[in-house]
Amino acid sequence: WQHKLNEGRWAAILWPEEYGGRGATVSQSVIYTQVMAAYRTPGIYNANGIVQIGPSIIAWGTDEQKARWIPGILDATEHWCQGFSEPQAGSDLANLRTTAILSDDGSHSVVNGQKTWISSAQIAKWGLFLFRTDPDAIGRGKKHEGITTFIIDMETPGIEVRTIGPIASRDAY
């Protein structure tokens, strides 16, 4: 469905035209949403990509990054997830503890930690993650500093995706 919508530039109507959108106004988007709801059309398959990740790449990405990722977000050939929350961070993302430290030779970052509540991670090819690149920031009372956004290939060795089953199926009683 999203692939079909993208053929007419309807997948991300708020995006600028030069990136495959329609440059729609907020009012036009509301009307579009109302019409889609009235006809009970399917939802967007890659909602994280369309609503948050694509616009972030458009705003802050390099031309190379835009060319690499925007088409797959629009036509849903590459599904995205976002990895922000962590088991010990609660709802305060500035408490995140998963680190991404530059390797000794400076060629890559080494990630160490755990994320949780990553909707659709099990089907995502790419993820937009927040990692702590200054592990001493929290101890210095500067927990909002030293957090960096990374795009991660979800098929990278060392990444383990474990689904959380429905609560109704657990032996909670």
Image (spheres, grey):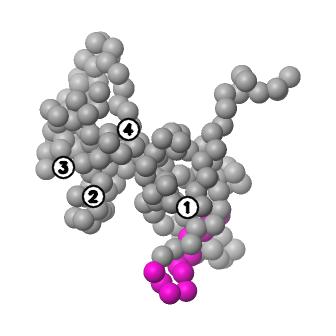
Q: Is residue 98 magenta?
A: yes
Q: Is residue 81 left or right of residue 135?
A: left
> Is disc 2 in contact with disc 1, using a CB cutoff of under 8 Å?
no
Tell me the residue at 53%/79% (across/down).
102
Q: Nearer the viewer, mark 4 or mark 3?
A: 4
At mark 2, the secondary structure is helix
Disc 2 from disc 1: Cα separation: 21 Å
Name the disc covering residue 157, or none: 1
Q: What amino acid does circle 2 point to?
A: Arg
| Residue 50 on image: x %, y % | 33, 42
Q: Nearer the viewer, residue 132 or 46?
A: 46
Disc 4 from disc 3: Cα separation: 16 Å
Q: Is residue 71 left or right of residue 99?
A: left
> Is disc 3 in contact with disc 1, using a CB cutoff of under 8 Å?
no
> What residue is shown with label 3?
19
> Is disc 4 in contact with disc 1, using a CB cutoff of under 8 Å?
no
Tell me the residue at 22%/64% (across/down).
63
Where, by quadrant of the figure, is residue 62 drawn? bottom left
> What residue is shown with label 4?
46
| Residue 61 on image: x %, y % | 30, 62
Pick out the residue farthest to the bottom.
105
Q: Earlier in the sequence, mark 2 or mark 1?
A: 2
Disc 3 from disc 1: Cα separation: 32 Å
- Magenta stretch: helix, strand or loop mostly: loop
Disc 3 from disc 2: Cα separation: 12 Å
Q: What amino acid does circle 3 point to?
A: Tyr
